[in-house]
Image: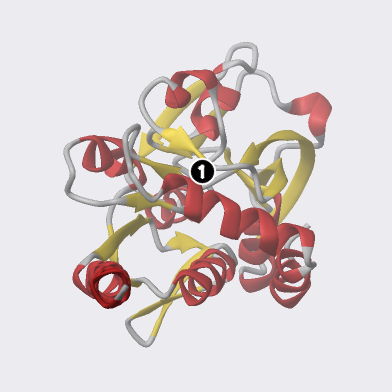
Amino acid sequence: MKNILKGIFIALIALIIFSCGEKEEKIQEKKERVFVIGTNAEYPPFEYLENGKVVGLDPDIIEAIFQKLGYQYKWANMDFGGLISALQTGKIDMVIAGMSITPERAKMVHFTSPYLTSKVAFITNKKNPINGMDDLENKKYGAELGTTKENTAKNILGSTVIPFQNNTSALLALKNGQIDGIVLDESVAEEYVKNNSDLLLVGILEGEPKAIALGKNDKDYEKINEALIQLVNDGTIEKLKEKYKVK
């Protein structure tokens, strides 16, 4: 009987040690992995630089997700057109940059559930305006390289589309009269018009849902996606949208 009890006691001790070791291993794993999050911080109010720090709606969403998970992260700010290739080659671990879900992108990355849908807007220069949505044809448009806005502009009859590495360059070209308009997310367009008295918002089209992109085989995809869904369901995302006046 004593031998049996002794055996049970030893087994219980071993189980406790194993359990503690497993927990310690998971804690250590959280400490060791630092997610590199790719973005293009030229999309106010989605993401932009403030005193050298990446801030905005998307960064606040990331902070809320990583607080839930207890993971560490850091930012990698780069051109939008290079984000997916950087994700595929392992230079970054995930992307949040007001990125729309498209069938082409979904072949290359693993999208989370969408966290919002943003409409597409056109802005123009008051000096040489586009006079409404019926006046879009045969114009010269700027759009950030690799975005769905570039494709939107290309689908306008007679349009000439000039891709830019970033929206700042497109904005400068619009102000200098080198292009007739820029195609942007509605909230981004409104932010630019608010801060530039020489610009006009021309009109708005339906857009696509936006999501976070991860590598196809990322082992933390399910946890990140579940955390994001919780933030949508508990109203956190809606409150953040209100904070940044994102429609």
Q: Secondary structure at mark 1?
A: loop
**Residue shown at the point (70%, 72%) measured from the top left:** 240
Q: Nearer the viewer, residue 54 or 28?
A: 28
**Residue shown at the point (62%, 42%) measured from the top left:** 113
**Quadrant (top left/top right/bottom left/bottom right) for the C terminus:** bottom right
| Mark 1 crowd level (few <14, some 14–19, many ≥20, 10 Å Cα) | many
**Residue shown at the point (47%, 25%) measured from the top left:** 106
Q: Amino acid at mark 1?
A: Met
Position of 220 with respect to 133 (left or right) is left
Q: Nearer the viewer, residue 39 or 63?
A: 63
- Residue 190 seen: no
- Rendered position, 58 above or below 88: below
Q: Quadrant of residue 244?
A: bottom right
Give the labeled residue for mark 1. 99
The colour scheme applied to this rendered structure is secondary structure
- Rendered position, 232 above or below 104: below
Q: Quadrant of residue 18?
A: bottom left
* Residue 135: x %, y % from top left: 76, 27
* Residue 43: x %, y % from top left: 51, 59
* Residue 229: x %, y % from top left: 66, 53
Q: Nearer the viewer, residue 30 or 104?
A: 30
Q: Nearer the viewer, residue 35 or 205?
A: 35
**Quadrant (top left/top right/bottom left/bottom right) for the N terminus:** bottom left
- Residue 147 seen: yes
* Residue 193: x %, y % from top left: 67, 63
Position of 48 with respect to 8 (left or right) is right
